[in-house]
Image (spheres, coloured by chain):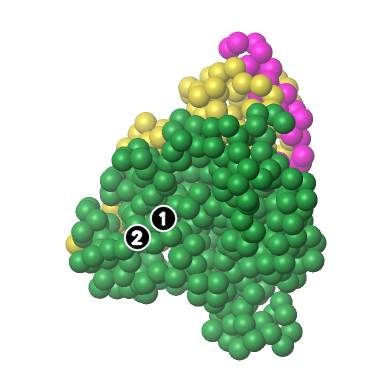
Chain colours: A green, B yellow
Amino acid sequence: MRIQPFIYLEPKTLKEALIMLDENKEKLRIISGGTETVPLMKLRLIKPQYVMSLKRLSNLKGIREQNGKVIMGAATTLTEIIESPLMNSSFKGIVEAASSVAAPQIQNIATVAGNILQGTRCLFYNQSEVVRGGLEPCFKLKGHLCRAVQGAKRCFSVYQGDLAPILIAYKAKAKLERKGGGRTVAISELFSGNGKQPINIEGEEILTRIILPLPKNKKSGSSYQKLRMRGSIDYPLASAASVVYSDEKGSIMDVCVVIGAVGSSPKIVPITSLTKGEELSIEYIDNVAQAAYKVAETVNNQALPGLYRRKVIKVLTKRALNNCLRDIHGGR
Amino acid sequence: MEKTTKRIVKLTVNKEIHEVAINVNRTLLEVLREELALTGAKESCGQGVCGSCTVLLDGLPVRSCLLLAVEAEGRHITTIEGLSCGEKLHPLQDAFVEHHAIQCGFCSPGMILTASAFLEKNPSPTEDEIRRALSGNICRCTGYAKIIGAVKALVDSGR
């Protein structure tokens, strides 16, 4: 499959990149690792007039600690995360999630921002132009029907990024910059929940870094659990990310569970807050798993049936929380 | 501000510098095979799933079907053709031959390049580590046991 022609832009500074983005907005697609963009261009699912490379912007790469926070450049590769001593010591769940993305060859080049800002996917949408050409266009192709759910009034495509759920669980933030300004938002705010337009950032904005608060005076446990067809390559069909904080003595202070690949955006599971000194009992974990099941929204638009994926969310949530407890209490 | 659809790209492949005039929409795999006649890297899925197009970019295995050739400018690219020393095979290639780790051979360039980059980083891996390192390369003859065996034998022999 050949990629259709485009104009290649190669800014040397972020300022130059922001000007190019401001001039071309939706006509332009940013390429960093390219592992998400190139397949979309090959399938003609996106047809950008301009492709802007970030390869010369070296200040968008790397992980560093600064004022009690960890700053991750948007063009940091997943392998850099997996091999970072800082990430391994403080954000184990993010390392687990990055290690579970596709295969090592893709991790070597895929970037944090590319993984977070990937679009939603659907068995009926992510097909070649030939297959799509024979069908009436669905909502995601600017049509008026959904191929997965007959009579549906909206798009049910699935957000299948691995990093966003765990980053949300860690309460990470994203720095977005545009010509003449910028803003910092929670990672969860990057998603609209609308399958047609899943990413909630403006055409002239560029994600430049991820900011992670370093936990102070507390222990943490984290885990990322993922269901996929082949352990060596595929996108998640359901995933659960959890982060649990405790004080130095091991009393649980805070729990956050975020589920992925069961809707058009990652979903924060509504959890009843713990009373002081309360343990994460089997009953409590069961209740969280049930809450995750309730917010999961799955239809038959992936390689496994929606009902099955929704049931698995309960299992993944329990596994993730039990792993967090093991981190905190040490092998219990 | 540079705006181009076609340009001259300087690619360093197997320690040789090649200047090729290409359209910017071409992948590294297309340029290697069609412009430089380096047909060791194979196109199979074209979607980054199978690993048969694996090449090394600055020593790290990547999918050349997902990489625009222009993005590889200024980096060191190694293809399977650059692994052997003329007629003398790389020890990994010898190990693959000795242990019958090649059936149809389509996945072999990707498997061998991925394994060579991995052994550079981790010269004495466990079998599990070898399996994880090669997990991104699919063999449709399903000769995985012999491939893992060949890499393991090479590690055990200490060559």
Is residue A263 left or right of A57 when viewed as pictured? right
Is residue A19 left or right of A136 when viewed as pictured? left
Residue A40 in view in this figure: yes
Helix, strand, or loop for circle 1?
A: strand
Which residue is depicted at the point 54% across and 52% down?
A: A169
Which residue is depicted at the point 79% across and 66% down?
A: A307
Amino acid residing under circle 2 = Thr
- The front one of A173 and A179 is A173
Highlighted range, magenta: B137-159
- The front one of A271 and A195 is A271
Main SS, magenta residues: helix
| Residue B147 belongs to magenta span | yes
Residue A234 in view in this figure: no
- The alpha-carbon separation of the residues under discs 1 and 2 comes to 7 Å
| Residue A260 belongs to magenta span | no
Residue A44 rendering spot, x and y as whole percentages: 51, 71
- The front one of A53 and A256 is A256
Tell me the residue that label 2 is attached to. A184
